[in-house]
Each structure stands twice: as C-alpha cells, then as structure tokens.
Amino acid sequence: MAVILDKSTLSRSLSVNLDHMATLRQVRRTSYPSLTTAAGICEVAGADGVTLHLREDRRHIQDRDLELLRETSLLPITLEMGSTDEMVDIALMTLPHAVTLVPERRQELTTEGGLDAVRLESQLSPVVQRLKEKGIVVCLFLEPDVDQIEKAHSLGCDSVELHTGAYSLDWEESRSQAIEKHLSRIQASVDRGCELGLQMNAGHGLHYQNIRPLAALPGLTEFSIGHSIICRSLFVGLEKAVGEMADLIRS
Ligand code: PXP
C-alpha cells in the first residue's frame, strides 16, 4: 500500500543542473569550466544535488563528466536520460543517486514536453525495474496530468518531475489566467502524487521570479534548475547564484 506523503512536513530542495556550464565548455572544446569545481561550489552554496543530462548526441555533458562527478561530488547526482539501452547501461555502470527519464529528440534545443508514460508503459516498465533493482531512485519527467502521475506510480517509480516549461513560457508573456491554470494543474498533480506516495519535483524554465509561486505550493519537494542559475552566476558568481535560488525555494 502506498504511504501518503504529508505535504506539510516535506522539506524543499534544489538540484542544480550543470548542462549549461558544459555547453560553454563544449563550444570551444576546452577543459574549462570544470564541472567538478562547479559541483563543489554548489555544495558549499547550499544546493542539495546536481543534475546532468547525458544526451544521445553528447552536446553538453560527456560520459567523463558523469564518471568524474560520481567519484568526487559530495552531492547526490541525478542523471537525466532517455530510456535507451545505451543510457540504461551507463546508469547501471555509474550508479547515480537518481535517474530522471526524459523524452529526447535530437533536433530539440532543450527537452520539450514530458514523457507520455501512459503510451510508453511497456517500454518504460523494464527500464524502471532494471534501475530500481540497482537501488537507483527512478523519476519520470511528466506533464502535470493526473493520468500520467498515476501511471508513474503503477510503474513503480519513486518520484515525478513535473515539466514546468509551459508555465514558464506563459510567465514570460505575463498571461495571468494561463499561469493560474498551470498552477492549479500542477497542484492537482502534486496532490495526487503525494496521495500515492510519490516524491513530487518540478523543473524546466524556472528562474528567480517565476519560482516564487511554485515554491509556495505545498507538496513540491525538489526543484531542478539550470539555465537561470548559470546565467546569473556570470554576474554574481556561482556560489551566490545558487545560494539565492536555494533561499527562494526554502523561504
Ligand atoms: N529538468 C529537466 C528534465 C530538464 O530537461 C531540464 C533542462 O535540461 C531542466 C530540468 C532544467 O531546466 P532549465 O535549464 O531551464 O532550468
């Protein structure tokens, strides 16, 4: 039987996505900036984890980044990946703390849309089982949709990361009615997930302004944030950029 999560007692956490720092390195194929140094600074600044998306085309994070961070990071590592055989083998070999399964298309600029867990059930089921057998926390990146959340639960996942991309886009256009709609869909998904005992996370397109209403929703636990933090770090430094975001999430 699922353990219902008490939303009033959940603490909030920040996992810093380092993909964009790797992008900066890969445009020149240099050895800097160092992701291991970055992960250390994230830890000092009060982050709770670091996230890496190992894409099929290796456009930013490289296999070596994952290996090095696995050896050196004091923070738990979340590996975002497609549910391919290649990626599952890498995860089983490197054993990150958590894996977030995401949809992946080569042409996309960034992850567009959540996984369709309902449609992909038969493909996802063995992947979830193999990862869980090795003690890896398994998360699905999903749209805020109750049917999808229920499918994540029936697949045996531990957590769900709600895709906040559509919320973020409407935020940029100041569409207040749409923003309210997103927030209530997100809250309904969080409520259902907590009832089912799933840890409910959120991420994509979140920044220092649009995080505030989300951080106020009861039941959301972890926020996975990259682009805005790395951009802000150009002006204030990484430690301050991470610390400010961690404060906003926990305040
Ligand atoms: N979560 C997932 C599943 C993602 O694919 C991304 C983008 O890499 C993020 C969170 C972080 O998004 P952003 O870089 O916009 O903060």
Image: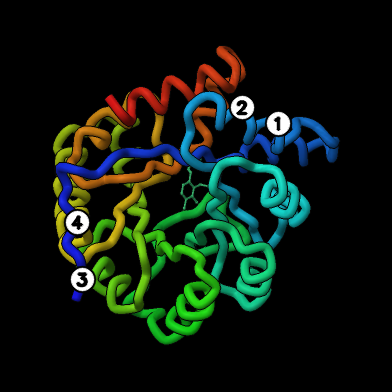
Q: Is residue 174 above or below residue 196?
A: above
**Residue found 52% across the figure and 24% down from its top:** 45
Q: Is residue 237 left or right of residue 16?
A: right
Amino acid at dot 3: Ala
Residue lying farthest to the bottom in this orientation? 122
Q: Which mark is residue 69?
A: none
* Mark 1 residue element: helix
Q: Earlier in the sequence, mark 3 or mark 2?
A: 3
Q: Is residue 211 above or below residue 166?
A: above
Q: Could you tell me how far apart the alpha carbons at marks 3 and 2 are, in whole angstroms?
A: 37 Å
| Label drawn at residue 41 | 2
Of pointers 3 and 1, the one earlier in the residue sequence:
3
Residue for point 42% across, 62% down: 139
User: What residue is disc 1 on?
Assistant: 37
Instruction: Decide if residue 165 is in sight here.
Output: no
For the N terminus, the image quarter is: bottom left
Foreground disc of the pair 3, 1: 3
Residue that label 4 marks? 5
Q: Are marks 2 and 1 in contact (CB under 8 Å)?
A: yes
Are the residues at dot 3 and dot 1 in contact (C-beta closer than 8 Å)? no
Query: Do callouts 3 and 4 mark residues in contact (Cβ within 8 Å)?
Result: no
- Tell me the distance, in whole angstroms, between the alpha carbons under discs 2 and 1: 6 Å
Q: Secondary structure at mark 4?
A: loop
Q: Which amino acid, by three-letter code, is at mark 4?
A: Leu
Q: Nearer the viewer, residue 27 or 62?
A: 62
What is the image's colouring? rainbow
Ligand 1 within 8 Å of disc 1? The answer is: no
